[in-house]
Amino acid sequence: NPHLADALDAGGRAITVLDGTVVVMRRGLDPIPVADLADIPLTLAGASRANVANALAATAAALGAGASIRAVRAGLSSFTPDAEHNSGRLNLYGVGAVTVLLDMAHNEASLASLLQVADALRAPGGVLAAVVSTPGDRSDEAVHAMGAVAGARADRMVVAGKRHYLRGREPGELEALWRAGAAEAGVTAVPTAGDEVAALGSLLEPALPDGSVVAVCALEQRAELAALIRARGGHELSPAEVAVRVAAARGAPGVVAPGPR
């Protein structure tokens, strides 16, 4: 990134990732390690590009405000994207060897980011499935574009109906826009479901191949979705379990996607 060189040439400090580690750089000095991406839960072991960028920005801001490297490391390592502390933001669950992501993706950028993370977690032989939906106050053009994004990135997709977020839309109107967008990406067979829970259930049954990932735009029913996952024997993944799945997706030697517990 040329901006890093510009900052260093001006006598400033640069924060970047070298070999999987967040580091602080200054011209003429060795990089100072802050934390490995595998030890920063928010990045999902580096699988979330958006949150890697957020971690770099947070590191730069904290150091600029006078925090120590030790304090920054403690902050990065202790903030987790789980349902208790960061509900609706890349909450990860395991159902056997299938990974489920619950996220409040509700525009083009957030949906693209969600699907990027899902793809980074997909192990060889797995599929990328998506439960998509959005509030009714998004423009026709935006929903159509999101349908095209999902159609291009996901192997399977289901459009979930809305109960409380129609915001002036007629029932079925949003689903038609999603399908039209997916058709633009060449996907013409797009099933719909009554709500988010029904949509996720339809993707989990019959069972997906091991290593598959289901990305869910979880807007209305996060608690109900988590309950469905647990009813199927699933659980929320710890940072260590996430790191194992990311390694399996990257084909790390000797690492396999976890099976049923």
Image (cartoon, helix red, strand yellow):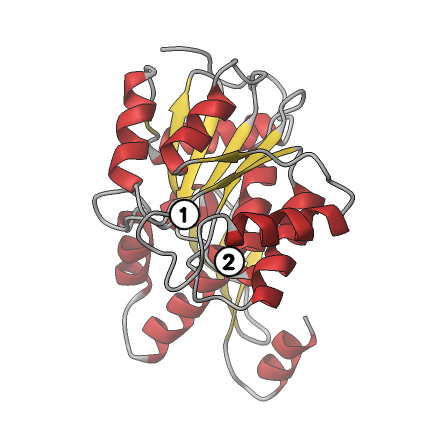
Amino acid type, residue under disc 1 in the picture: Asp
Residue named by callout 1: 103
At x 30%, y 46%, the residue is: 80
Residue 228 percent across, percent down from the top left: 31, 25
In the image, residue 9 above or below residue 234 = below
Residue at the image point whose x is 46% and y is 58% from the top: 106
Q: Is residue 236 above or below residue 73?
A: above
Which numbered marker is on residue 110? 2
Work out which quarter of the rendered image holds the N terminus and state it. bottom right
Residue at the limit of the structure toward the left, as seen here: 84
Mark 1 Cα within 10 Å, few/some/many (few <14, many 20+)? many
Classify residue 38 by image quadrant.
top left
Closest to the observer: 89 or 1?
A: 89
Residue type of the residue flagged with mark 2:
Ser
Q: Quadrant of residue 199?
A: top left
Q: Position of residue 209 (x, y in %)?
A: 59, 16
